[in-house]
Amino acid sequence: MKTAFITGGTSGFGAAAARRFAKEGWQIVVTGRRTDRLEALVKELGGDKTLALPFDMRDKAAMESALSSLPAKYRDIDALVNNAGLALGTAPAPQAKLDDWTRMIDTNITSLVTITHKLLPTLIKRKGVIVNISSIAGSYPYPGGNVYGGTKAFVKQFSLGLRSDLHGTGVRVTSIEPGMAETEFTLVRTGGNQAASDALYKGVRPLTADDIAEMIYWVAALPQHVNINRLEVMPVNQSSSGFQVFRETSD
């Protein structure tokens, strides 16, 4: 039986991915900060094949403790899905909160590379797959995207770097880069502003968590000799736009 390790599994892409892998008979290790949601997911998927690790990804000591406590049956990890991440704030750089910036960096970059590094020996041994969740924000800048976009650009490039460094090991690495997807993403970004979230997705028919989960599983289930380097995906109703132009006025 194969095992998938999924970070940020309390909602959105992570929870949907856990359900998708479980549907195919995989064992699941799922992490997150909200213990109640993890427990509900374990109950839903079955406690005999699902393990919850409740901890904050930014807490290195808690991460190490959780990993060291893994029961033997869950230690042979075949797929690492680095999904945990967030965006905070929509203000332009001069008005943005530095604490928001550092929290995004700590969550989207530092914790991702930390857990990847810790699980690499197992993934190499198992000839596994690493799926990193990036974003189109890492390729296409937009006002207010500043540090969030920067962190996702890092994830994209880090994925390509891993591919290079893991050459010959059999480990596959993919960066999945979604566009507009309706999850709790905007609620978190706006501090719980449901109206802002509803307005953003109104009339768009955005991607769903299940859409992305299907892609994550597809990547992981491909034959061992096939690697998808990058997978950029948007809803049909979203596309990239032109450059901004500021026009000065003469006195």
Image (cartoon, helix red, strand yellow):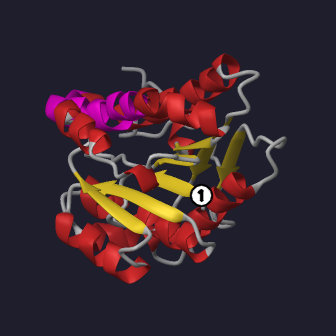
**Quick check: can you spot residue 191?**
yes
Closer-to-camera residue (42/210): 42
Number of marks present in the image shown: 1
| Residue 26 x %, y % | 57, 65
In percent of the image, x 69 and y 66: which residue is there?
236
What's the residue at 41%, 57% (across, down)?
29
Looking at numbered disc 1 in the image, what kind of residue is underneath it? Lys
- Which percent across, then down, holds residue 125? 61, 33
Q: Is residue 165 above or below residue 6?
A: above
- Left or right of residue 36: residue 207: right
Q: Residue at x 60, y 62 (%)?
A: 1
Front one among 14 and 121: 121
Q: Residues within 10 Å of mark 1 (few under 14, many from 20)?
A: some
- Name the residue beneath numbered marker 1: 2
> In the figure, is residue 75 to the left or right of 188?
right
Residue 191, percent from left and from top: 18, 58
Decide whether residue 96 is among the magenta residues. yes
- Label 1 element class: loop
Q: Position of residue 12 (x, y in %)?
A: 41, 66
- The magenta span reads 94-115
- 203 lies above or below 173: below
Q: Is residue 206 visible?
A: no
Q: Which one is nearer the viewer's eye here, 248 or 163?
A: 163
Vertical relation: 138 (above or below) 72 = above
Image quarter in which the C terminus is found:
top left
Q: Main secondary structure of the magenta part?
A: helix
